Amino acid sequence: TGVTQSPTHLIKTRGQQVTLSCSPISGHRSVSWYQQTPGQGLQFLFEYFSETQRNKGNFPGRFSGRQFSNSRSEMNVSTLELGDSALYLCASSSTDHTDTQYFGPGTRLTVL
Amino acid sequence: AQKVTQAQTEISVVEKEDVTLDCVYETRDTTYYLFWYKQPPSGELVFLIRRNSFDEQNEISGRYSWNFQKSTSSFNFTITASQVVDSAVYFCALEQGGSEKLVFGKGTKLTVNP
């Protein structure tokens, strides 16, 4: 099976927080998160490997994530703003740094 | 800093036409990887092709082919005999060797009309 994400869609109001979930391809230990908006396009949020954040994009501290021992990952956005409305994509790759990232279907977050 | 530029915002072709999507990248790294992904209306990014900076050999895979030229920092992608199902947004992406961080272009929306 491929990368799975939940939920598919989510509607929140400003000030709330949200948690998104990602399950990588079996055997993949690296999970990356991306935000896609019409204005900014696809932007890298962070990457986790073996429960450790290895790389981080240029996003405020309201965006955080974690990875569990089974490689599943969650990302959290606190104090939601209207501008956080986006498609959040998760990708997984194997332990090898040269491997390709495979993406999930995404979670579409709408902030009202 | 790394940067990927896809100058073509939208392309419209008629089925069976060949279409080339342009991609120009900027990086100071000597080891890097280049990718093409496809995003149909469903939203999921689908991996198409990948090339590393040490391999400029151009290949053909079915209806897909690519032209990687380090001298011009270009990584163009061609679809031969386009089909309606090829309609999607195509993204070119660059990854610094070992970083797991993809830098994407803005995408090219391809519409293939019957």
Image: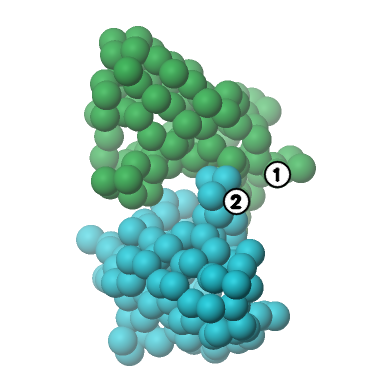
Query: Dots 1 and 2: beta carbons under 8 Å?
Result: yes
- Label 2 sits on what residue type? Tyr
Image coloring type? by chain
Mark closer to the chain start, 1 or 2: 1
The chain letter of the green chain reads A
Determine which residue is flagged by label 1.
Answer: A2
What residue do we see at 44% from left, 73% from top? B12
Q: Answer with the quarter of the image where residue B80 lies.
A: bottom right
Place of residue A1 in the rendered image (x, y in percent of width and height, measured from the top left): 76, 42
> Is A2 left, or right, of B95 in this rendering?
right
- Label 1 sits on what residue type? Gly
Residue that protrudes farthest toward the right in the picture = A1
Q: Residues within 10 Å of mark 1 (few under 14, many from 20)?
A: some
Task: Examine the rendering and report whether any part of residue A10 can be seen.
Answer: yes
Please report, as a chain letter, where disc 1 is located: A
What residue do we see at 29% from left, 10% from top? A15
Determine which residue is flagged by label 2.
Answer: A102
The chain letter of the cyan chain reads B
Place of residue A44 in the rendered image (x, y in percent of width and height, measured from the top left): 38, 45
| Front-most of residues B79 and B34 | B79
Task: Examine the rendering and report whether any part of residue B37 can be seen.
Answer: no
Place of residue B19 in the rendered image (x, y in percent of width and height, measured from the top left): 49, 81
- Do discs 1 and 2 belong to a common subunit? yes
In the picture, the disc for residue B109 is none
Residue that protrudes farthest toward the front in the picture = B114
Q: Quadrant of the C terminus of chain A?
A: top left
